[in-house]
Image (cartoon, rainbow, N blue to C red):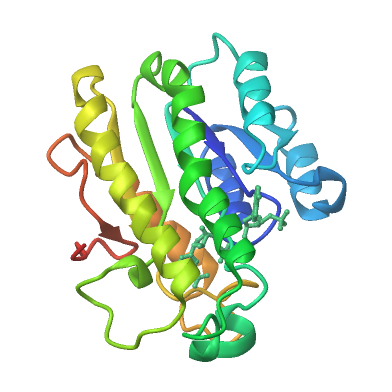
């Protein structure tokens, strides 16, 4: 069975990815910043009897990413899911569209969002490219957001989150072009407005449905669909 590596797997969509891929028989390498606090993930790993392995990983820590890649040297990874993401202190779930407004920028927070949302997936891809290249499916995806779409932005605000995820999209576009020669498929994915800590309880899409849809989109990714921006229900989004 194929192997998937998922970042930010302790809660939210990451945890749901673990649940669904494990139920499907995949080998799952699940990373979380604090596995000790990720009790649901621990329970899932125990129930999976060795098919779900948990590793501590903060994607802002490049040395830790390199160390994990070295530890997993020689392990083919069919699918790398860069799921970890942050809105920083001012989140959509907390402040709605009033978060991260013009005139209130916290530049340290903004830089941290870049480090997690844009540079984290880049570093993960650079560290794990050989693992992915050695697999059968050869896919790298990242959880982006419709808020990264410049063409689709008609509400303003959310400067740190939008710009860090737009940077992520630009990074994945280049990566798709660069890694095509190694037959690696790369795509940013929008999960919908999903009811997690980030999305808030009023979000219309259940994490189970979002992840089920995303898994279908990922399964259907081909070299023609690489370097394009996909939504959880299969719709293509404008950059
Ligand atoms: N929910 C939505 O409506 C929505 C919409 C569009 C895009 N997205 C994207 O989908 C992805 C998953 O979001 P979610 O809704 O599941 O959010 P969430 O419930 O807030 O979960 C975020 C996940 O990212 C992890 N994370 C944050 N900073 C990290 C770091 N420095 N290193 C490693 N992991 C880190 C968190 O780990 P800890 O538990 O350690 O904090 C957590 O597992 C994110 O990239 C998000 O931007 C979500």
Position of 125 relative to 96 (above/below): above
- Residue 234 appears at what percent x and percent y? 25, 61
Q: Is there any visible trace of residue 157 in the rendered image?
A: yes
Residue drawn at the location 26% of the way across and 26% of the way down: 179
Q: How many marks?
A: 0
- Residue 208 appears at what percent x and percent y? 52, 65
Left/right placement of residue 203 relative to residue 49 reads: left
Position of 116 relative to 237 (above/below): above
- Name the quarter where the C terminus is drawn: bottom left
Q: Is there any visible trace of residue 213 in the rendered image?
A: no
Residue drawn at the location 49% of the way across and 68% of the way down: 160
Residue closest to the far top: 74
Left/right placement of residue 186 relative to residue 2 reads: left
Left/right placement of residue 222 relative to residue 124 reads: left
Q: Quadrant of ligand 1?
A: bottom right
- Residue 55 appears at what percent x and percent y? 73, 33
- Residue 14 appears at what percent x and percent y? 59, 53
Quarter of the rendering containing residue 178:
top left
- Closest to the observer, 185 or 95: 95
Residue drawn at the location 55% of the way across and 14% of the way down: 75
Position of 130 relative to 112 (above/below): above
- Closest to the observer, 109 or 214: 109
Left/right placement of residue 98 relative to residue 109 reads: left
């Amino acid at each position: 069975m194929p192997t998937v590596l998922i970042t930010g797997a302790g809660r939210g969509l990451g945890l749901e990815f673990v649940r669904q891929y494990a139920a499907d028989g995949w080998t799952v390498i699940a990373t979380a910043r604090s596995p000790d606090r990720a009790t649901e993930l621990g329970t899932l790993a125990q129930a999976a009897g060795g098919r779900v392995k948990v590793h501590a990983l903060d994607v802002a820590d490049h040395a830790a990413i390199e160390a994990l890649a070295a530890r997993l040297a020689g392990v083919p990874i069919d699918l790398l899911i860069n799921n970890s993401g942050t809105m920083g202190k001012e989140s959509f779930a907390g402040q709605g569209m009033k978060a991260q407004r013009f005139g209130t920028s916290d530049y340290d927070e903004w830089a941290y969002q870049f480090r997690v949302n844009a540079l984290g997936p880049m570093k993960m891809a650079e560290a794990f490219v050989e693992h992915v290249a050695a697999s059968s499916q050869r896919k790298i995806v990242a959880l982006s957001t419709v808020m990264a779409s410049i063409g689709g932005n008609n509400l303003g605000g959310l400067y740190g989150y939008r710009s860090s995820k737009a940077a992520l999209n630009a990074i994945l576009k280049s990566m798709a072009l660069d890694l095509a020669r190694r037959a690696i498929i790369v795509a940013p994915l929008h999960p919908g407005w999903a009811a997690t800590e980030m999305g808030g309880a009023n979000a219309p899409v259940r994490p189970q449905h979002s992840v089920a849809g995303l898994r279908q989109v990922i399964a259907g990714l081909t070299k023609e669909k690489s370097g394009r921006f996909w939504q959880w229900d299969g719709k293509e989004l404008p950059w």
